[in-house]
Image (tube, grey):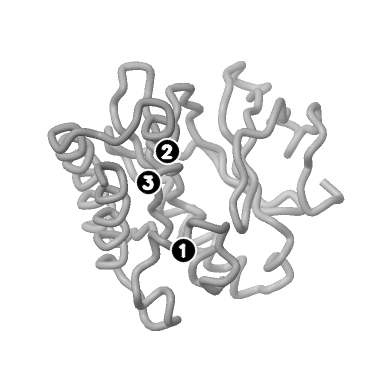
Amino acid sequence: MADSHPTDSGIVIDSRYRLIAPLGTGSGSQVYLADDIRLRRQVAVRVLRRTHVDDPSFLEEFRSEAQKATNLNHPNLIPIYDWGEQELPYVVTEYLSGGNLRNLVDTAGNLSSSQALLIGIEIAKGLEYAHKRGVTHLSLKPTNILFDFESNIRIAGFGISKTLASFSSANTETPGDQHYLSPEQIKGRRIDQRSDVYSLSCLLYESVA
């Protein structure tokens, strides 16, 4: 992966994950659909941009957060299968084809209050589980709220999002994503689990407004 983003399909990461197609992009990473050659299954691979990879403290935090997120096991969280650092840090997760909350609102319109309540409860369950284990997200937004084939809610982004948030400013966020950041994130102040609660409130309000 010589470029800042491995955009060509067919590239193989760590002799195991063959990239098929891009699924989405953010301020600090690119997500790809990929084949796990060893286990013969499709996965999602999130590859970080080159921006911070020469910073030892960034890599140390990435390793710490990725390892903690790998140990999370909850029905409302996307499981992390693997992570590594072949040229660029990456995280491998379960691949879900059911779309995300942004897709749902854009295609079907705003949610009813009862729909938003049900979705909010499921997100809150996942966050509570992670928070009790010392793991924060810090980049909660509609595109990180995914649906599985049974329309169950799954939160994506644990393992990388906190590291990116800790080493980036609000100005480097993808346009529109700043709306979900807590005031303390915007101002560069100390952040904790309460920032996730603020972001959850923002995305739920937007989904019904």
What residue did someone put label 3 on? 71
Q: Which residue does the image show at 65% across and 53% down from the upper left? A: 48
Q: In the rendered image, which quarter is residue 52 located in?
A: bottom right
Say above or below: 153 vs 68. above
**Residue 123 pos. (x, y %):** 25, 43
**Residue 197 pos. (x, y %):** 24, 60
What residue did someone put label 1 on? 178
What residue did someone put label 2 on? 102
Q: In the rendered image, which quarter is residue 16 located in?
A: top right
Structural distance between the alpha carbons of marks 3 and 1: 29 Å
Structural distance between the alpha carbons of marks 1 and 2: 15 Å
Give the mark, 1 or 2, whose residue is nearer the N terminus: 2
- Badge 3 density bin: few <14, some 14–19, many ≥20, Cα 10 Å: few
Structural distance between the alpha carbons of marks 3 and 2: 27 Å
**Residue 59 pos. (x, y %):** 61, 66
Secondary structure of the residue carrying tag 3 is loop
Q: Which residue does the image show at 54% across and 74% down from the upper left? A: 169
